[in-house]
């Protein structure tokens, strides 16, 4: 019996080993290497002669005005897109959950933006909101609201607004699917009991629906917050940081510093600062939700 148990352990380890090797080579080692790079002056000029500089890269990042702009843009992007996606996604999910016909059609229709390529969607939005784009043509030549083209993408908040609209549009479908699955798990008997007690639609939503999907709300909140900090493709293709790095977000600024300026140590330090921020946000979000559950 002991020999059999030992043999089973060997078999389990043999099955786990390929996955552990892949994880170690392509995930764990790059993270450790990146953390090590963040303490060195590592750029094009010193690629083969790195100099240990301690926390200088971290101090440089935190003192960089362009990083502060990119970080502020990322915060605003997250604060706008995350609640908007969740509220609109939940609203659509409740509408679909309440109908009896064509549910599959509406699920597919609202989920199509999710599976649409970020590159294609970003280029379409850029074309629509470009100075010579479709929206300006409609405003000037069709409805005649204005005689001059509006420079939607030539200002910081104009460009960020377009990127946020794209993020919200693409995220509604994912939230719809997640919340729809959660809504279908809430027992109908709770709604019936609430109705018998005289609760209206809003009271049923607040006291039955929201508590019933609280775990899903937390899951969506954490995932979307991480996604908000990982925004890259839309801002890169729509504004590319213009004008004057005013529409940079943390990932586009990290990419610029690494591959355009050659500041790999700077970019490594920036990546760990953002990882720390996300970890703190996740802990706070879990803590707040847990406190509400205890109350």
Image (spheres, rainbow, N blue to C red):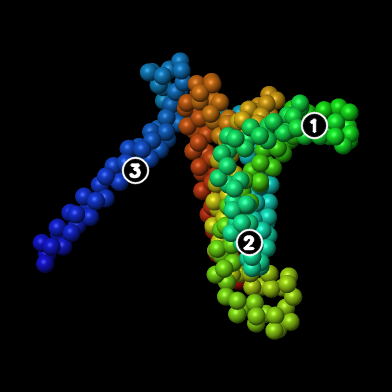
Mark 2 Cα within 10 Å, few/some/many (few <14, many 20+)? few
- Comparing 259 with 166, the one in front is 166
Q: Residue furthest top?
A: 45
Question: In the depicted view, which residue is nearer to us: 211 or 147?
Answer: 147
Task: Please tell me which residue lies in front, 261 or 175.
Answer: 175
Image location of residue 255, percent across then percent down: 53, 29
> Mark 1 sits on what residue?
136
User: Which numbered disc flags the more N-terminal residue, 2 or 3?
Assistant: 3
- Residue at 54% x, 30% y is 254
- Marks 3/1: CA distance? 49 Å
Quarter of the C terminus within the rendering = bottom right
Residue 37 point in image, percent of width and height:
42, 30
From the image, tell me which residue sits under label 2.
102
Q: Nearer the viewer, mark 1 or mark 2?
A: 2
Contact between marks 2 and 3 (CB within 8 A): the answer is no
- Residue at (61%, 69%) from the top-left corner? 211
Q: Which residue is mark 3?
A: 23
Report how far apart the C-alphas of labels 1 and 2 lie in the structure: 36 Å
Secondary element under disc 1, as helix, strand or loop, is helix
Q: Residue at x 75, y 32 (%)?
A: 134
| Pair 2/3: label in front | 2
Disc 2 is placed on an element classified as loop
Residue 210 percent across, percent down from the top left: 63, 67
């Amino acid at each position: 019996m002991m020999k059999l148990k030992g043999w089973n352990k060997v078999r389990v380890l043999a099955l786990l080993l390929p996955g552990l090797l892949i994880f170690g080579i392509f995930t764990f080692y790059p993270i450790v290497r990146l953390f090590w790079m963040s303490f060195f002056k590592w750029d094009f000029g010193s690629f083969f002669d790195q100099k240990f500089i301690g926390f200088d890269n971290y101090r440089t990042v935190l003192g960089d005005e362009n990083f502060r702009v990119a970080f502020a843009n990322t915060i605003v992007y997250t604060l706008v897109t995350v609640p908007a996606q969740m509220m609109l996604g939940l609203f659509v999910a409740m509408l679909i959950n309440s109908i009896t016909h064509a549910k599959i059609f509406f699920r597919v229709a609202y989920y199509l933006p999710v599976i649409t390529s970020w590159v294609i969607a970003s280029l379409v939005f850029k074309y629509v909101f470009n100075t010579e784009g479709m929206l300006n043509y409609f405003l000037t030549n069709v409805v005649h609201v204005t005689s001059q083209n509006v420079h939607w993408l030539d200002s910081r908040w104009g460009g960020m607004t377009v990127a946020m609209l794209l993020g919200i549009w693409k995220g509604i479908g994912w939230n719809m699917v997640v919340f729809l699955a959660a809504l279908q798990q809430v027992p109908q008997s709770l709604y019936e009991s609430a109705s018998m007690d005289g609760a209206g639609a809003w009271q049923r939503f607040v006291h039955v629906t929201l508590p019933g999907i609280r775990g899903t709300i937390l899951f969506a909140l954490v995932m979307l917050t991480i996604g908000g900090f990982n925004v890259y493709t839309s801002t890169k293709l729509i504004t590319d940081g213009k004008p004057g790095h005013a529409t940079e977000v943390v990932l586009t600024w990290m990419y610029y510093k690494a591959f355009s300026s050659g500041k790999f140590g700077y970019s490594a330090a920036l990546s760990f600062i953002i990882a720390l921020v996300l970890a703190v946000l996740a802990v706070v979000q879990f803590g707040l939700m847990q406190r509400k559950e205890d109350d």
